[in-house]
Amino acid sequence: MKRFFIKTFGCRLNQYQSEKIAEHLSACNLLQVKNPDKADIVIVNGCVVTHKGERDTRKFINKYAKKGKQVVATGCYIKLPYVRASHNVSFLSFNDIKKVFVPQKELLSHQSRHRVLIGIQEGCNFRCSYCIVPFVRGPSKDRNKEDILREIASYTEQGAREIVITGTEIGGYGREQNTNLAKLVREIKDAFPLLKIRLSSLLPLYVTEEVISLFKEGIVLPHIHLPLQSGSRDVLKDMKRPYKLERFIWAFEKLYQSHPNMAIGTDIIVGYPTETEKDFEMTYKLIDKLPFAYAHVFLYSKRPFTQSFHLKELPYKVIKSREKKLLRLVSIKKKRFLQRFIGQYLYGMIEKKENNILKGTTENYIKFIADGRYNFVPGQYVKIKIIGIEHNYAKGVIENLS
Ligand code: SF4
């Protein structure tokens, strides 16, 4: 039996697609291994969103090609016009992989998972000035609704208790099918009433009253990623983001009020070429002011085929010092968010038991640990009382099971 290994770089959509590739290869009688050195085929699902992502993807491909492995590169990386396949590196899209490797048994999820990613669309119709994604993924393409419902049904039969709806820009779902994201989510909930549904990331312009109702009514879990990128009106405009600062703040406040435990995370890019010290201060102040649960900070990365490619970059020292300052604030914010829940009860899913400690994630995306003396099954929902914070985890006491 041939063995394969998958390395995934980048976003949740890539993770989702890697899971699909793994399921497909397993149905082709290939065995997935955790060590690339033990594999016959090394699949590399690359990312090119940042310069670092592209470099790391290339390094990984070259490393295993040099070791004589059969390497299959896939994902955004292979769409770059200046990268080439070689004698032991093939470039295959997921559709090509399906043609090259033909299933010999029924396609079933190869492992039992309790939280699964469900991709509902791919690609983006916007053109943010720094972003290479529309170039490599193309315009937004929806998945057929029936196909999505079928996939969810198959996961629930295998024990999934929670799904995370993912894609490049899920908020735009439905244009081609005369529906929208909120309607799709309601249909999923109607078909699978016990299933917990989490939305991944949503652009502020898609935060409508219809979407807010999903949180208010408890149809989706109280957690969302709302990408900001900059707290400066001018920089947002230069970035050609499809919303204004006022819209972001409105969306944030509405979502925050929609559920008492709401967790809102965000992305920030520091060092965009037109970002002045004053612009950066505006971002800093906004992050400080709004009750974010967490924020991911990225350094601006110049990407080919983007509108900002020709802009003069800021000195690296300046970008790094802004990153450092913001990261300090982000760590305080995260702690503050966790502290809010000390003494409160939350619901969460147990994911694993390690060294007699149970680990899991609450409905509002707090990673928790709890005493593992009891025999809990992974995937079980529990009510926990948060009693403190330990190494970035909320420490909880399990009250009862559901
Ligand atoms: S919304 Fe902007 S940043 Fe997001 S994928 Fe589309 S172009 Fe890129």
Image (cartoon, grey):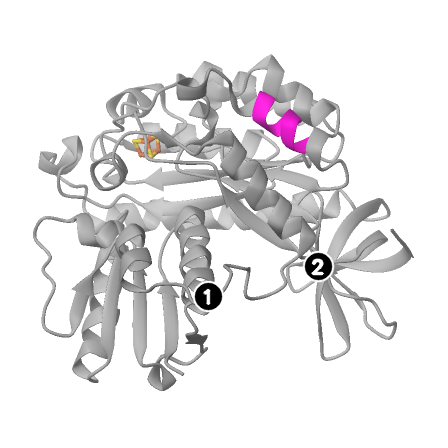
Q: Residue 316, relative to residue 179: is it above or below?
A: below
Q: Position of residue 197 (x, y in %)?
A: 65, 39
The rendered magenta stretch, by its main secondary structure, is classed as helix
Q: Amino acid at mark 2?
A: Gly
Ligand 1: image quarter: top left
Can residue 366 be seen here?
A: no
Judging by the rendered image, the residue that carries numbered circle 1 is: 27
Q: Residue at x 38, y 33 (%)?
A: 229
Q: Position of residue 244 (x, y in %)?
A: 39, 16
Range of magenta residues: 183-189
**How far apart are labels 2 and 1 at the CA level?**
30 Å
Judging by the rendered image, the residue that carries numbered circle 2 is: 360
**Is 363 displayed left or right of 91 in the figure?**
right
- Secondary structure, mark 1, is helix
Q: Residue 34, relative to residue 334: is it above or below?
A: below
Mark 1 residue crowding within 10 angstroms, few (<14) / some (14–19) / many (20+): many
Q: Amino acid at mark 1?
A: Ala
- Quadrant for residue 68, please give it: bottom left
Let me know if residue 337 is in the magenta part: no
* Mark closer to the observer (2, 1): 1
